[in-house]
Image (cartoon, grey):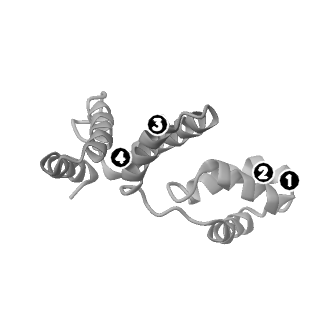
Amino acid sequence: MTLQEQINADVIVAMKAKEEITLRALRSLKSALLLAASEPGANGSVNDELALKIFQKLAKQRKESLDIYVQNKREDLAQVERDELAVIEKYLPKQLNEEEIKVLLQEVLTAAGASSAADFAKVMPLAMKALAGKADGKVISAVLKNMLA
């Protein structure tokens, strides 16, 4: 079952269970998938790789909104974002912790022959490709800078 089919099935389950929070988050995922499927060249469907990228983008938006709401002491709006983020994260692969990221980045550094901070620009795209979907770009960047320092 593709992610798109899974979302459609889960929307129906959430409707029947009257889970408003889950339903709201799933509808935003479904909407984003439908927009991507209607773009030229998409053939009316979205593959799982593109769906994961879309979900990551939506999760990142929720995190950014959550930070803004917390800073402005709007706990009511922050809670909505937390709830939706929790639903979206169920469809994303498990995020790696910092130690796991270091191990994978060490492999990338070794393969690229990088050893100094001057190599950061050369290695960062390789690191992002190797860790795509497994870690946030900000975390990857910070760990990589520490390793090259």
Q: Which residue is mark 4?
A: 51
Examine the rendered structure and indicate whether residue 110 appears above or below residue 40.
Answer: below
* Label 2 SS: helix
Left or right placement of residue 41 versus residue 88 in this view: left
Q: Earlier in the sequence, mark 4 or mark 3?
A: 4
Q: Earlier in the sequence, mark 1 or mark 4?
A: 4
State the image coordinates of residue 25 (x, y, percent, origin top left). Answer: 33, 42
* Label 4 SS: helix
Residue 76 tag number: 3
Q: Are marks 1 and 3 in contact (CB under 8 Å)?
A: no
Q: Are marks 1 and 4 in contact (CB under 8 Å)?
A: no
Q: Are marks 1 and 2 in contact (CB under 8 Å)?
A: yes
Residue 104 tag number: none
Q: Between tags 2 and 3, which lies in front?
A: 3
Which amino acid does the dot numbered 1 rest on? Answer: Ala
User: Depth check: 103 or 67 in front?
Assistant: 67
Q: Which residue is mark 1?
A: 117
Residue depicted at 62% across the width and 49% down the height = 137
Q: Are marks 4 and 3 in contact (CB under 8 Å)?
A: no
Q: Which residue is mark 2?
A: 120
Q: Quadrant of residue 31?
A: top left
State the image coordinates of residue 82 (x, y, percent, origin top left). Answer: 46, 46
